[in-house]
Amino acid sequence: MSDSILSMNVNPSKHCKIFINDENSQQNIANICKIYDVNDFNSEMKIIKNQFNQNLFNILHINVRSLLKSDDIYDFLRELNFEIDVLAISESWLNDSNENLININGYVFKGKHRRIKHGGGVGFYIKNNLDYKIRDDITSIKNEFEFLVLEIINRPITKIVLIIVTYRPPTYDVNSFIECLDDILLVANHENKLIIVAGDFNIDLSESNNNNNKFNFLQLMNSYSLQQTITISTRVECNRQSIIDIFTNIPENILVSGVISHCLSDHQPVFSSINLSKKMFMFPEKRNAPSVKFSYSTNRINNLNQRLSQVNWQVVYESANIEKAFKLL
């Protein structure tokens, strides 16, 4: 399985994207990602808060498997003894009749739940002191998957933050989900805002998994310079381990990230604490020279084939000189 958080954006083309593969950033993330018990987490975050208090943005994601146990989440947040700005939720299992039963003191809840059958659902607990708006205009692109987009709009020392939470049920087609997420990220990316994505993608991102779903998903994430920040197992089953993940495209701004060992759900909570000071941002042109790779989603392959079909290849076929034929293109 895979939960995730991602953040910020570059300006890739819809038809052919390149991405930054910064090995140093990836190694740094691997070094700071840890598993914490509650006491260790509180000690670590106390140090972080003392150094970066005004510029901190703290996001936590839980695949909760029913928000009707919201009292347990409230108790968990009190245990943390640290302010979480946004708590992203997947598998809320809510409906219209019980959404008013899951309030948590100090937070407002905004969610999107299933209308037809039980299960699924996504949402946010948002700290009361934050100004925000729900961006239904972004998620209206596709409706068959569960997405919700939150915009935080009152942090004057930073760029505006867009947070996307999503849940892909295991039975839903992975390629369709990737294409839908691609469309949403493209719209969000064009707004030149920080982007964070949290969710349970039900794609195993552990190193031991080498299937195409993992490859295609990571290609999409990398095409938006979104890097993985959770590198340790977050869900352990009797026959396998998997990573419920967090990504960011400003990895140098991650102060600490990891997994909190807790019994809230069969998925361990994951978190990232991000320094949102503008002075910290390294935009693509200021980074080290990137390696170039391509994303192979179905949409892009179709777009490539369409463009190739519009090229006049006859002059190339008729040329006897390879160099001249190449220049004709």
Image (tube, rainbow, N blue to C red):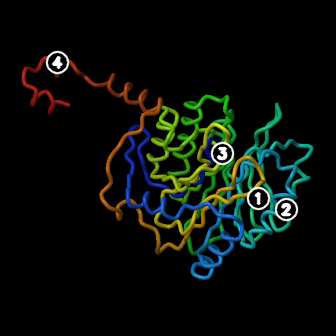
Marks 1 and 2 in Cβ contact (< 8 Å):
yes
Closest to the observer, 291 or 224: 291
Marks 3 and 4 in Cβ contact (< 8 Å):
no
Direction front: furthest residue:
238
Which mark sits nearer the N-terminus, 4 or 2?
2
The three-letter code of the residue at mark 4 reads: Tyr
Q: Which residue is mark 3?
A: 236
* 15 up-or-down from 162: above or below: above
* 168 up-or-down from 314: above or below: below
Label 1, secondary structure: give it: strand
Instruction: Give the label, 3 or 4, closer to the camera.
Output: 3
Closest to the observer, 29 or 148: 29
Marks 3 and 2 in Cβ contact (< 8 Å):
no
Q: Which residue is mark 2?
A: 104
- What residue sits 92% from the left and 43% below the top? 97
Which mark sits nearer the N-terminus, 1 or 2?
2
Label 3, secondary structure: give it: strand
The three-letter code of the residue at mark 2 reads: Ile
Q: Quadrant of the C terminus?
A: top left
Label 2, secondary structure: give it: loop
